[in-house]
Amino acid sequence: MPDDFKSMSKPIPYGKQSITEEDIAAVVETLQSDFLTQGPKIEEFETAFANYIGSKYAVAVANGTAALHLASMAFNVSPGQKVITTPITFSASANCVRYCGAEVLFADIDPKTYTLDLNRVEDLFRKEKNISGVVPVDFAGQAVDLEELKKITDKYGAWILEDACHAPGGYFTDSKGTQQKCGNGAFASQAIFSFHPVKHIACGEGGMITTNDEKIYKRLSKLRTHGLTKDPQEMQENHGGWYMELQELGYNYRMPDMLASLGISQLKKADAGLKRRKQIAEVYDRELKNADVLTPFYKEGHAFHLYVIQSSKRKELYDYLRTKNIFTQVHYIPVHLMPYYRQFGYKRGDFPNAESYYDRCLSLPMYPALTEDEQEYVIDCIMQFK
Ligand SMILES: *Cc1c(COP(=O)(O)O)cnc(C)c1O
């Protein structure tokens, strides 16, 4: 059996973590230390991550969904408010608003970038009252132009919570020609990331909130550990060394130290991973030019979490690739069409761009460990598909 056949007989997923010997050693070292949860590795990871992203502060939490929840709480999202997001995202970007009892408004996507259409966002602000904020998603790794979005939100006194799960290391170029890194806090007062295994930096589970606002940073640190504080400056009373105060209702959303040490080790390879993702995208762009699929449009600074093509025979192509042991995926089923959101009156036809995108989209294998042979095999299979 030729060697390349063996490698193809192994399933090729759309996304996958890369774990090295150094990653393993880092976790083992922490396992042998005195701290398993929220010890010194958390602060080390937070500092390294904030440096990488270009934000002042970072708060590590249990996962990306917990990050969205706490960020919403720190913006005081509450019943009676409305928050805008995109239907083409993982449902957690919308669910965090519901956790806080507020209403989710969706705005359609731009058919070219697949991110929020800012004109539709502005339409909503004109039409609806009590919109407190917007959750833009740097979908697939394409950074949303937050400078443009902030012009709108500022007019209405609303905040921005950037869901940058797909875009650590990504950026957009602002009107002054400055590269604005996703999550750097220049326009969005909070941004969140996930360390799920398919994301750029894998911890198994894990999330991060970045911000430049000290008050928000302190509040988030408290909220992730039940709402408790031991800071004498903040406490109303002090009964002795054991004393701590529950000041508001928080959660146990801490990240374990073992996972933070994995994150620190993974972060060191983030730039190399980003470079490899770009190469993979370039090869797909070039080789699929003559295939019967639409390759993605992207701007400079794209972080290539996903490589999404569109096909008029998407289901057939998906099924065909599965028979070839290639496990592509669909990102995403529009959130407004999920039964949970349909109960609020959303239905098919509400967001035509998102829906026609959903009917055709397919995410091809995209991760740094994808070999050249594997990618060639994926491309050959797509070219052969009739
Ligand atoms: C992965 C992801 C999340 C949720 O992150 P978890 O760590 O899985 O909770 C939220 N939003 C987007 C866009 C994501 O891709």
Image (cartoon, rainbow, N blue to C red):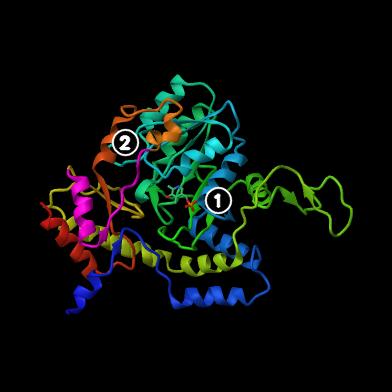
Q: Amino acid at mark 2?
A: Ala
In the image, what residue occupies the spot 49% across and 56% down? 53
Question: Badge 2 is on which residue?
Answer: 354
Mark 2 vs mark 1, foreground winner is 2
In the image, what residue occupies the spot 31% across and 36% down? 354
- Residue 38, located in which quarter of the rendered image? bottom right
Q: Is residue 359 depicted above or below 328 in this figure?
A: above
Please rate how many residues cluster around mark 1, counting C-alpha atoms within 10 Å: few if below 14, some from 14 to 19, many from 20.
many
In the image, what residue occupies the spot 81% across and 52% down? 232
**In the rendering, at what x and y percent does residue 79 appear?**
59, 29
Q: Amino acid at mark 1?
A: Ile
Measure the alpha-carbon separation of dots 2 and 1: 27 Å
State the residue in front, 318 or 268. Answer: 318
**In the rendering, at what x and y percent does residue 319 appear?**
22, 52
State the residue in front, 171 or 31. Answer: 31
Residue 152, label in figure: none
> Which residue range is magenta in the image?
313-334
Question: Badge 1 is on which residue?
Answer: 209
276 with respect to 100 (left or right): left
- Residue 197, located in which quarter of the rendered image? bottom left
**In the rendering, at what x and y percent does residue 174 appear?**
40, 44
Considering the numbered disc 2 on the image, is that residue within a helix, a strand or a loop? Answer: helix
Q: Is residue 203 depicted above or below 87 in this figure?
A: below
State the residue in front, 89 or 139. Answer: 89
Please rate how many residues cluster around mark 2, counting C-alpha atoms within 10 Å: few if below 14, some from 14 to 19, many from 20.
many
Residue 324 visible in rendering: yes
In the image, what residue occupies the spot 24% across and 70% down? 9
